[in-house]
Image: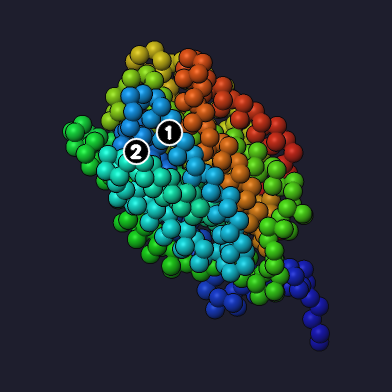
Amino acid sequence: MTSVPTASTAPGSTAASTGTANAATGGNTTNANRPRRAALAAAAGTAIEYYEFGVYSYLAVIIGPHFFPGDDPTAALLATLAVFGSAFLMRPLGGIVLGRLGDRVGRKPVLILTVVGMGSATAAVGLLPTAGTIGVAAPVALLLVRLAQGFFAGGEVTGSATYLAESAPHGKRGFFGAFTPVGVAVGGGAAALVAGITTTVLSESQLEAYGWRIPFLLSLPLVALALFARKRLEDSESFLATKKEQATAKAPLTEVLTRYRGPVVKVTLLAIGSNCGYWVGLIFMNIYLTTDLGYPKSSTFWIMGGISLFVACLMPFCGALSDRWGRKRLITIGFAGYAVLVVPAMLVMGLGSFPLAVAAMVVLALPMPIVQSVTYPTYAEMFPTRVRYTGLSFSFNIGTIIGGGLSPYLATWLISATGNLLAPGFLLMVAVIIALLTLRTVKESSQEALA
């Protein structure tokens, strides 16, 4: 008797594709622990990226005079933040190159490459000679190292989001996808805690002489741990199935720009809002509290570290909630929270009471786990497997330039130019309003299979 193919076994179905991927990996992809290993490995690599960006931002006030000496501390801080932003300019190029490799060769080898490249560049910052030693060559060297770091970062967080979306069980992409931003929060929190320990243990003279280098050099053991975790991974089932069927894109960027212009624009505008929420709502607030309001550096570092780790703990819960309630509803709540809370929180911070400033910072951070944890799987769901790495890397990194690379500089410049300490809050409000308008055009995808 001849059996009739059912929908679950028909050629081209999800089950057939999964079976192809299982065959390609020796049948090991059904292991229930695989999504957990993928989540931990992805979070570890992303933590290194945001550890470096966080350390640089937290120590910008200390680093500035070493590479941009002068009588004006604000000018030195602006120059340091401009170099900080330069790394973001390389992210789209890194996203294009590394995204193409990820869509053509595989997710795993590129994720290994990015973590090694970022970690090496981070450690290099801690080894650079200062302007007092080599003069004008010092800021040039700092710029080159930051550009290299930005290139590799262009394929890290987006590769992590791509891999987790493709590795998660159906109906749990929000939960497992949240571990990419968990890495973001853990990396930023670790940066704040290391900065806090360094500034507490070392004297001012020790910190100026060599202490600022220590947090950068500590990236090396982090790289070793992330590399160990990622080398144990298999590539995603979706990619292996696509490669087995010889359906990988020959020119991923061309295909993205010709067939998926809508998702590119949407991810870019959403990424501006989410990145501005992180870099203004958390990272810049360190500069705001210490430089503009005069609160103690070491205490502020400890608070920022604690808030980041608190946010990281909430992210898997928010991601899981989006699997049940839908992505758009939660993202809307998160962006609206930023718009409503940022200015009142900054007003409370300016009252001169450090405990009140801490409370205001905690309240301002509440939208962060919602926005960060739910947007990453949403981005990945907008592109098909054959161009997902490239499409996500290109569009997200364009948004990151504006919302992340430029926002700390713009926030500092706006305060300097207008004298209004609330100006960064209005900058964040504009960014999230744009994101909210964009979100209205996004299709709910939490219950749909990946394309």
Horizontal and vertical percent position of residue 280: 49, 30
Residue lying farthest to the top in this orientation: 351
Identify the residue shown where x is 46% and y is 63%: 112
| Three-letter code, disc 1 | Ala
| Three-letter code, disc 2 | Phe
Identify the residue shown where x is 43% and y is 30%: 78
Choose between 284 and 347: the one closer to the eye: 284
Look at the numbered disc 2 and give the secondary structure of its residue.
Answer: helix
The label number, if any, that marks residue 79 in the structure image: 1
Q: Are marks 2 and 1 in contact (CB under 8 Å)?
A: yes
State the residue position of label 2. Answer: 67
Q: Categorize mark 1 by other alpha carbons within 10 Å: few (<14), some (14-19), many (20+).
A: some
Say if 166 sits above or below 135 in the image: below
Choose between 28 and 256: the one closer to the eye: 256
Image quadrant holding the C terminus, namely: bottom right
Describe residue 376's horizontal placement relative to residue 187 as left or right: right
